[in-house]
C-alpha cells in the first residue's frame, strides 16, 4: 500500500538528497532535499558545473577528473567535501554515490545520491550509546509497544526471566507476573502511555519462571516518543530489590523486637503477683509477637511451697512426665474459641485439648513441653493439618538458674513461622517474665512471713479488761502491698487498770514488722513497770532510736576496755546500720475503772475520738508530740474523765487517710460514722469499716474501740487509816467485813493475812496516812497506799532474822503482787483469784521452808 512517510522517519535523521548530471557534465536536476542540504535553490545550480558549484578551488581539478570518469560509465562512491551554506565557509563532508545512467538518446549521464556524513556519525553515536545503555546495563531494560507487548528487552532482563533477549519480543506482563500483580502493572503501563507521567519505584512481587522463591522488583516506567513527539511505547527499568526488601524486613523486625522488649520492661513486673505478671507477659506478646499464648507455672510455686519442682534443675521431672503445672494465663488475638486448637503433640495428659485456665496438669515425658522444661531449651511443637495453629514455641521460664514454668507462643495459619530471631526473642521474653515471677515468689514468701509475724504479735481473740467493753479490728494490706507496722494492744495493769495502745511503724515490709514486734514487746515490758504514760513513751523513744544503731542501741564511739580498731568492712556495716532509722507513732492510754479517768500520751499519732452519750464525737486535744525515734522532746500527758457508756476509739492512719483521700476528710468521716454509739460495740466497728472509704489494700488498718463501763460502787471498798499500830487490826476487820459482804468467805483468811502484812510494812517503812482499797471484778485486788517513796523489796531472810518474810508470804499466797509509784507516794498491791467452788490449794512443805 502506498502511503506518505510519517514525520520523524529515518529519512529525516539521515538527510539523504539526490541530483542528476547530464551528458554535458552540468547539473540537470536538483531535488528539494539537495536544496536543503546544500542551501541552494534549483535555479541557482541547474546548468552549472557541480565541481564549481560545491567544491573548494583547490579540489576542483581532482573533482573534474572524477566527473569525467563517471560520464564514461564508471560507478563511484566516496567522500566529497563541500561548503556548508550560511556558515561562513565552514566545510562539511558528504558521502556521495554516483550511478551512471543513459538518456533516451543513448548518451551517458549520472544520478548522484548524497548523504550528510555528520548526520550519519550522530546516528552511529546514538546507536552505540543506546546499545551500551540498553545492552550492557546491569539493570533490566524492557520496551513495551503501544499494544503493551514487549518490543525489546536487554540481556539482563532475559537473565532474570530466562531465554535470550530476542525471545521476549511479543510477550505481555501476564507472562512474567501472577494475576493481581500483572493487572496492576498493566494498569500502570496504560496510565503512563496515556498521561505521559512517569512512575518511579513501582513495587512488584512475583516469581521468575521456573523459580519457586518470591522476588521483589522496583520498576521505573516512562513514555518513549519519536523525533516528531509521537508516543511509540513505554520503557521500563526493573531492579531486583529482594535483598533490600529482606534487609528492610529484618530491620523492621529488629525494631519491632526492640520495641517489644522495651514494652516488656515497662509493663511486666509492675505487680508482685504471679498470675498478674503472667497476664502482663501475654498482653505484650499477643498480638505483637504471636497469635495465641499460654503460661504454665509449677503448682508448688503457685501454692507457695518453699522448694517447688523447678528449683532442682533438669532432674526435677517426675518419672511419668513433668511435675504438676497450673495454667495461670491464656490469650488469643484471633478468637476466644481458637485457643482450643492448641497442637495435640504438646497437650498434657488427660482429656483431649489444652488445659483450662486454672487447671492443674502434667505434660507427657516425651512431649516437647516436658523436654523444654527438662533441658531448659526452646522446643518446637509441630502442628498438623487439622489444627488452626501451624507453629508453636515451648519456652522454659528460667530465673536465677531456676525453672519456674513454661510459656507457649503460637502462630495461626497465615502468619509467618517462627525463625531464629523469633526464638531468641521468645527466650528473652520468657526470661524477663521469669525474673519478675521469681521476684513475686520471693516477695510473697517475705510478705507471708511478715504477715505471720505481725499477726502473731497482735492480741489473740477479743481482749478483756475491767470496766471496759472492747472490740478491735485489724485489716492487713492486700498481697499487692507490703506488710505494714500497725499494731494495737490491750494490757492489764494492777488495780484493774488497763493500758490501751495503738501504734504504727513508718515503712513497710519484714523490717517494719520486726520493728513493730520489738516496740510492742517493749511497750508491754514498760507497762508492767507501771510507769506513767509519758514515761512509757520516753523509754519507748529510746528503744526506737536503738533499733537503728549497731548492737541494738550502743551509740558509743569509744574504743576503751581493750577494744580493737574496727575494720573498714565493720565501719561500712556500721554506716549502713545507722542509715536504718526506725520511726513510729504511738498513742498510749491508761484507764482506771474506779475513777473512770483515762490518761493519754501521744507520740505523733492521730488523736483519739471520744463519743459521750448525747454528745457529738470529739477529737481529744492530746498534744501530738514527736514520733518515736526522733528523740529530744518530752511527752505530755492529758487526763480525761469519761462518762459511763462513753465510747473511745483509737486507730491508725490507714482508716482515715489514703492516696487522693485527705486526712481532714477522713477524720470527719470517722466522726460521722460514730454518731450512733449505742449499738453493740462489734456492730459499731463493722459500721465504721463499711462506711469509711478506707481504700483498703493501700495500707494496714488497726481499730481499737472501748466502751466505758466503770466499776460499780458496791464492788469497791476504800478506807483511810491513821498511822498507828491499831490500824493493822482495823484493816483486817474492814477486809473481813467486805469479803463477807461479797460472799467471798473462802478468801477471808488469806486476805486478812496479806492485808496485815502490807499495812504493817506501811507503818514500819512508809509515811503519812494509810489507805486500804479492795476492788472486785474478775479477780480480787487489794491496794495499800502510803506517802513513802521507798519501794518494797522482796528478800530472803536469814535463819536468825525475826522478820523479813512478809513479802515472801505475799508472793506465795497471791496470784500476783507488786508496787508502783503515785504522785504522792507508792502503792503496794496483791491480787487473788476468785474461788471456783474447789478448795484452795494449801502451801506445800517446800514452799513454807523456802521462807527460812
Image (tube, rainbow, N blue to C red):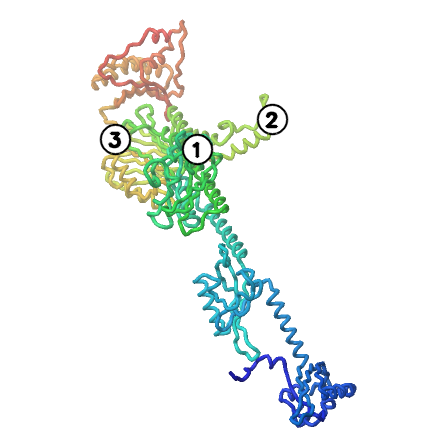
Q: Does residue 176 appear to the left or right of 847 in the view shown?
A: right
Residue 589 in the image: state x and y as whole percent: 35, 32
Indicate the secondary structure of the residue bearing disc 2.
loop
Mark number for residue 709? 3
Q: Position of residue 215 (x, y in %)?
A: 50, 57
Look at the image and tell me whether residue 847 can be seen: yes
Binning the other alpha carbons within 10 Å of mark 3 as few (below 14), some (14 to 19) or many (20 upward) gives: some
Residue 194: image tag: none
| Quarter of the rendering containing residue 19 | bottom right
State the image quarter where residue 599 is shown: top left
Q: Which residue is mark 1?
A: 310
Q: If you read the primary sequence from the N terminus, does the residue marked by circle 1 or circle 2 appear first?
A: 1
What residue would you read off at disc 2? 565
Task: Work out whether residue 711 or residue 639 is closer to the camera in this orientation and state it.
Answer: 711
- Tell me the crowding category of disc 2: few under 14, some 14 to 19, or many 20 or more residues within 10 angstroms, Cα based: few
**Disc 1, SS:** helix
Q: Is residue 680 left or right of residue 326?
A: left
Amino acid at each position: 500500500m502506498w502511503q506518505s512517510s510519517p514525520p520523524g522517519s529515518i529519512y529525516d535523521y539521515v538527510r539523504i538528497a539526490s541530483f542528476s548530471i547530464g551528458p554535458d557534465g552540468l547539473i540537470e536536476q536538483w531535488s528539494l532535499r539537495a536544496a536543503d542540504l546544500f542551501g541552494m535553490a534549483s535555479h541557482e545550480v541547474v546548468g552549472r558545473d557541480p565541481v564549481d558549484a560545491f567544491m573548494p578551488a583547490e579540489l576542483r581539478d581532482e573533482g573534474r577528473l572524477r566527473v569525467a570518469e563517471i560520464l564514461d560509465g564508471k560507478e563511484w562512491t566516496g567522500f566529497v567535501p563541500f561548503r556548508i551554506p550560511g556558515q561562513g565557509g565552514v566545510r562539511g563532508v558528504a558521502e556521495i554515490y554516483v550511478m551512471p545512467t543513459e538518456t533516451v538518446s543513448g548518451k551517458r549521464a549520472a544520478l548522484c545520491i548524497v548523504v550528510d556524513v555528520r548526520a550519519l556519525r550522530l546516528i552511529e553515536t546514538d546507536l552505540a550509546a543506546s546499545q551500551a545503555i540498553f545492552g550492557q546495563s546491569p539493570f533490566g531494560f524492557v520496551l513495551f509497544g503501544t499494544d503493551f507487548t514487549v518490543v525489546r528487552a536487554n540481556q539482563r532482563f532475559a537473565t532474570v526471566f530466562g531465554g535470550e533477549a530476542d525471545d521476549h519480543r511479543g510477550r505481555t506482563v501476564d507472562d512474567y507476573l501472577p494475576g493481581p500483580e500483572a493487572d496492576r502493572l498493566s494498569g500502570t503501563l496504560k496510565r503512563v502511555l496515556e498521561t505521559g507521567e512517569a512512575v518511579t519505584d513501582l513495587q512488584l512481587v512475583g516469581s521468575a519462571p521456573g523459580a519457586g522463591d518470591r522476588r521483589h522488583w522496583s520498576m521505573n516506567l516512562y513514555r518513549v516518543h519519536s523525533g516528531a513527539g509521537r508516543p511509540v511505547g513505554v520503557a521500563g527499568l526493573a531492579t531486583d530489590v529482594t535483598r533490600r526488601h529482606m534487609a528492610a524486613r529484618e530491620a523492621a523486625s529488629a525494631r519491632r523486637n526492640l520495641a517489644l522488649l522495651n514494652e516488656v520492661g515497662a509493663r511486666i513486673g509492675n505487680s508482685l503477683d504471679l498470675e498478674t505478671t503472667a497476664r502482663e507477659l501475654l498482653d505484650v506478646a499477643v498480638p505483637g509477637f504471636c497469635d495465641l499464648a499460654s503460661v504454665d507455672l509449677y503448682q508448688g510455686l503457685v501454692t507457695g511451697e518453699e522448694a517447688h519442682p523447678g528449683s532442682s534443675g533438669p532432674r526435677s521431672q517426675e518419672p511419668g512426665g513433668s511435675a504438676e503445672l497450673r495454667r495461670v494465663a491464656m490469650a488469643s488475638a484471633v478468637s476466644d474459641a481458637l485457643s482450643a486448637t492448641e497442637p495435640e503433640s504438646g497437650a498434657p495428659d488427660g482429656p483431649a485439648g489444652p488445659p483450662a485456665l486454672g487447671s492443674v496438669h502434667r505434660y507427657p515425658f516425651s512431649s516437647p513441653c516436658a523436654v523444654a522444661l527438662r533441658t531448659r531449651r526452646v522446643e518446637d511443637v509441630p502442628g498438623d493439618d487439622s489444627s488452626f495453629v501451624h507453629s508453636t514455641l515451648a519456652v522454659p521460664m528460667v530465673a536465677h538458674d531456676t525453672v519456674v514454668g513454661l510459656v507457649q507462643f503460637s502462630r495461626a495459619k497465615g502468619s509467618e513461622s517462627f525463625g531464629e530471631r523469633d526464638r531468641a526473642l521468645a527466650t528473652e521474653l520468657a526470661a524477663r517474665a521469669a525474673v519478675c515471677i521469681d521476684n513475686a515468689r520471693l516477695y510473697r514468701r517475705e510478705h507471708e512471713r511478715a504477715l505471720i509475724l505481725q499477726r502473731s504479735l497482735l492480741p489473740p481473740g477479743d481482749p478483756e479488761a475491767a470496766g471496759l467493753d472492747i472490740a478491735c479490728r485489724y485489716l492487713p494490706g492486700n498481697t499487692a502491698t507490703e506488710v505494714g507496722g500497725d499494731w494495737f494492744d490491750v494490757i492489764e495493769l494492777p488495780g484493774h487498770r488497763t493500758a490501751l495502745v495503738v501504734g504504727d511503724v513508718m515503712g513497710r515490709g519484714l523490717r517494719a514488722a520486726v520493728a513493730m514486734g520489738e516496740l510492742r514487746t517493749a511497750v508491754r515490758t514498760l507497762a508492767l513497770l507501771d510507769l506513767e504514760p509519758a514515761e512509757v513513751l520516753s523509754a519507748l523513744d529510746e528503744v526506737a532510736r536503738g533499733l537503728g544503731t549497731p548492737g541494738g542501741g550502743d551509740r558509743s564511739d569509744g574504743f576503751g576496755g581493750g577494744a580493737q580498731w574496727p575494720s573498714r568492712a565493720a565501719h561500712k556495716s556500721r554506716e549502713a546500720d545507722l542509715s536504718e532509722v526506725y520511726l513510729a507513732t504511738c498513742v498510749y492510754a491508761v484507764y482506771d475503772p474506779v475513777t473512770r479517768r483515762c490518761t493519754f500520751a501521744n507520740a505523733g499519732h492521730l488523736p483519739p475520738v471520744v463519743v459521750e452519750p448525747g454528745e457529738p464525737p470529739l477529737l481529744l486535744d492530746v498534744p501530738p508530740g514527736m514520733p518515736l525515734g526522733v528523740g529530744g522532746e518530752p511527752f505530755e500527758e492529758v487526763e480525761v474523765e469519761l462518762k459511763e457508756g462513753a465510747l473511745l476509739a483509737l486507730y491508725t492512719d490507714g482508716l482515715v487517710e489514703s492516696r487522693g483521700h485527705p486526712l481532714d476528710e477522713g477524720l470527719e468521716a470517722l466522726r460521722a460514722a460514730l454518731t450512733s454509739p449505742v449499738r453493740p460495740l462489734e456492730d459499731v466497728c463493722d459500721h465504721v469499716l463499711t462506711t469509711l472509704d478506707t481504700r483498703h489494700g493501700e495500707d494496714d488498718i488497726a481499730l481499737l474501740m472501748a466502751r466505758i463501763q466503770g466499776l460499780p460502787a458496791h464492788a469497791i471498798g476504800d478506807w483511810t487509816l491513821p498511822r498507828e499500830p491499831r490500824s493493822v487490826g482495823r484493816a483486817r476487820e474492814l477486809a473481813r467485813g467486805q469479803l463477807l459482804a461479797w460472799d467471798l468467805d473462802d478468801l477471808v483468811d488469806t486476805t486478812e493475812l496479806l492485808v496485815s502484812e502490807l499495812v504493817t510494812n506501811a507503818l514500819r517503812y512508809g509515811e503519812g496516812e494509810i489507805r486500804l482499797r479492795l476492788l472486785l471484778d474478775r479477780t480480787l485486788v487489794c491496794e495499800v497506799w502510803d506517802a513513802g517513796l521507798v519501794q518494797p523489796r522482796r528478800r530472803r531472810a536469814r535463819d536468825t532474822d525475826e522478820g523479813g518474810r512478809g513479802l515472801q508470804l505475799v508472793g506465795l499466797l497471791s496470784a500476783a503482787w507488786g508496787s508502783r509509784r503515785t504522785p504522792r507516794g507508792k502503792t503496794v498491791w496483791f491480787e487473788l483469784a476468785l474461788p471456783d467452788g474447789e478448795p484452795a490449794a494449801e502451801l506445800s512443805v517446800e514452799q513454807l521452808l523456802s521462807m527460812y
